[in-house]
Amino acid sequence: MSDQYALRSHSPEETRLAGGRLAAELEPGSVVSFHGDLGTGKTCMIQGVCQALHVDDYVTSPTFILINEYAGALRGAPIDIYHFDLYRLFSAAELEDLGAEEYFYGQGICLIEWPERASELLPASCLKVALEHAGPEERLITVRRPPTQ
Ligand SMILES: Nc1ncnc2c1ncn2[C@@H]1O[C@H](COP(=O)(O)OP(=O)(O)O)[C@@H](O)[C@H]1O
Ligand SMILES: [Mg+2]
């Protein structure tokens, strides 16, 4: 069954809360893609996910490298979190060379900004979050879970 929900955020705090709600739906091996233009709040929502997963580091988009790695906890068990920002990715092959598939099919949690750059490498089970501008401070956030067999 495939399911989906949408919500509206009116502040960065609300977007972080949406990230916290999403975190509660994750499990080891979850991959989440965050779609949306620059400034829609992808990093902000990922900060909320990471906060809910007890990450102590300051969460910011990876810039010179494509991946930031954080140590978190999920329901009391330690979990590795991989935050990708593929904005500057040249090709999917470049990501493959970095061994990304080991992350995407591993036991950590992958949170991916600009996933379009490597869509063919993402697992079919990938959760899709779409963020859209709906006003200066308002964002429409849609979370879509793919059908399960
Ligand atoms: N409702 C909202 N949710 C998230 N960010 C918002 C919201 N309203 C305004 N903003 C602002 O939009 C920007 C979002 O930045 P960021 O999370 O880095 O976006 P992205 O990673 O999608 O480029 C921040 O400057 C934030 O303060
Ligand atoms: Mg960002």
Image: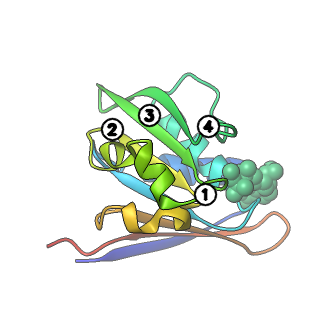
Pointer 1 residue: 90
Q: Which of 19 and 63 is in front in this view?
A: 63
What amino acid type is highlighted by mark number 1? Phe
Label 1 and label 4: CA atoms lie apart by: 12 Å
Q: How many numbered marks have been drawn onto this rendered protein structure? A: 4
Is residue 33 visible to us here? yes
Pointer 3 residue: 53
Label 4 and label 2: CA atoms lie apart by: 19 Å
**Above or below, 123 relative to 64:** below
Dot 4 or dot 2, earlier in sequence: 4
Pointer 4 residue: 65
Residue at image coords 49%, 31%: 69
Quadrant of residue 78 within the rendered picture: top left
Q: Nearer the viewer, residue 97 or 44?
A: 97
Is residue 21 visible to us here? no
What amino acid type is highlighted by mark number 3? Leu
Label 2 and label 1: CA atoms lie apart by: 24 Å
Label 4 and label 3: CA atoms lie apart by: 22 Å
Please say if the residues under marks 4 and 2 sit with CB atoms less than 8 Å apart. no
